[in-house]
Image: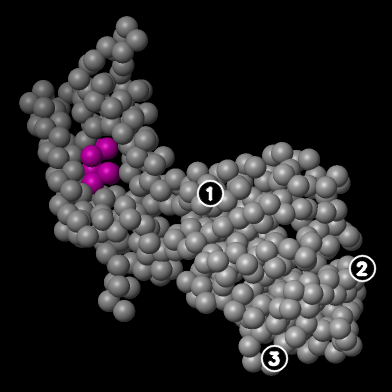
Amino acid sequence: MSTTEHQTASEPRPRTTPLSPRVSVVIPCLNEAGTIKECVERARLALSANDIVGEVVVVDNGSDDGSGSLAAEAGALVVHEPERGYGSAYLAGLATARGRYIVMADADLTYDFNEIPRFVAALEAGADVVIGNRMNNIHPGAMPWHHRYIGNPLLSGFLNVLFRTGVNDAHCGMRAVRREVLPRLDLRTTGMEFASEMVIRAAKEKLDIRQFAIEYHPRGGESKLSSFRDGWRHLRFLLVHSPNHLFIFPGTVMAVVGAVVEFIVITHIAVFGREWDVHALIAGALLAIVGTQVVALGICAHTYATYFMGERDEWFDRMRKRYTLEHGLLLGGSLIIAGLVLGIVIVINWINHGFGRLSEENVAVLAATLIIVGIQIFFSSFLISILGLRRQG
């Protein structure tokens, strides 16, 4: 549980009231003794200089170098959050912040706190979320080359492909948000992927997201970022929150390709100047079965996200209104019956040939595929219906 420590700094202070600061500046901090005091002073000076009623909230995320005490001495309201993590720190800070507008920035002097009025102005102009864009104003030595030219462009680009946010620098640490939209964002992640989550949730909620260029300076102190670990956490989060790209699209491609391959083999259509036989048929069956299962997992993921996480997806909303449990049971049952019928035909032919050698490999593989796919659809329909019971609540 987070705890707080009130500011004890001497003047000058930004004008504040106990109940209604206009702006809260939230700064997560983990062992930033060399920079946190200056960050707080710069933030408070930016508020005072622009006659902004505000507060500075520093979240001490388990520092063992006295960062929290230094922040309090500089005039910040200090929140102690023992659970380590970038997201954990921000969740604690956002829960404590009282301002109508919340400006977020790191504790390492990489961001210019004199930009605070620009973020506040954008929010006052109607924006719900404002993101800084560092990529064209990076000072020498401020960002490793693999972050600047590989990591950030790829992750931000991939995020935009999946969610169409239009944000050029989705992982910029200086951003601002209206406090009133925090319940709609429903932020949950505890690690570095928190930055991606905020952008994705804002896009899904169709909030007004704006951005403008800011400068990025060399940091003071030691970086806490792990390039590959944190990069993977971002990528994992993007995929997990996009069931269409993780499950539906690849699963559909596999199922369709598999069905086409099976059709070509069964009907003896020549491809590339030759007819394909049982080995191609098995490969097609494998693709069809795996593809169907992956699509079923994707639909289950959509169902869970809709009923348990409050997600909304237009495609899934249309599908769940049009198709019911009975549709799935009918489709799955029909495929099972078709497979069983083919199996009976094989047995009858075997009996008619005096229980001799059985040479119905192609039909047998097709029958097995139909039965397996039918069973997958049949029972996945029940699972989706069980997940959908949540809507009764």
Residue 116 is left or right of residue 277, and the answer is right
Determine which of the numbered discs, if any, sits on residue 17 in the image: 3
Q: Is residue 153 above or below residue 346?
A: below
Magenta range is: 368-374
Q: Is residue 253 above or below residue 172?
A: above
SS category of the residue bearing label 2: loop
Residue 19 is left or right of residue 292, and the answer is right
The residue tagged 2 is 34
Could you tell me which residue is drawn at 33 percent across and 67 percent down? Answer: 387
The residue tagged 1 is 166
Marks 1 and 3: in contact by CB < 8 Å? no
Query: Magenta span has 266?
Result: no
Give residue 52's position: percent from left, percent from top.
Answer: 71, 78
- Residue type of the residue flagged with mark 3: Thr
Give residue 161's position: percent from left, percent from top.
Answer: 50, 44
Residue 25 is left or right of residue 248, and the answer is right
Confirm whether residue 197 shows in the render.
no
Could you tell me which residue is drawn at 53 percent across and 59 percent down? Answer: 209
- The residue at the far left in this view is 352
Q: Residues within 10 Å of mark 3 (few under 14, many from 20)?
A: few
SS category of the residue bearing label 1: loop
Q: Nearer the viewer, mark 3 or mark 2?
A: 3
Q: Is residue 74 above or below residue 255?
A: below
The overriding secondary structure of the stretch rendered in magenta is: helix
Q: Spatial distance from mark 1 to mark 2, Cα to Cα?
A: 36 Å
Confirm whether residue 213 shows in the render.
yes
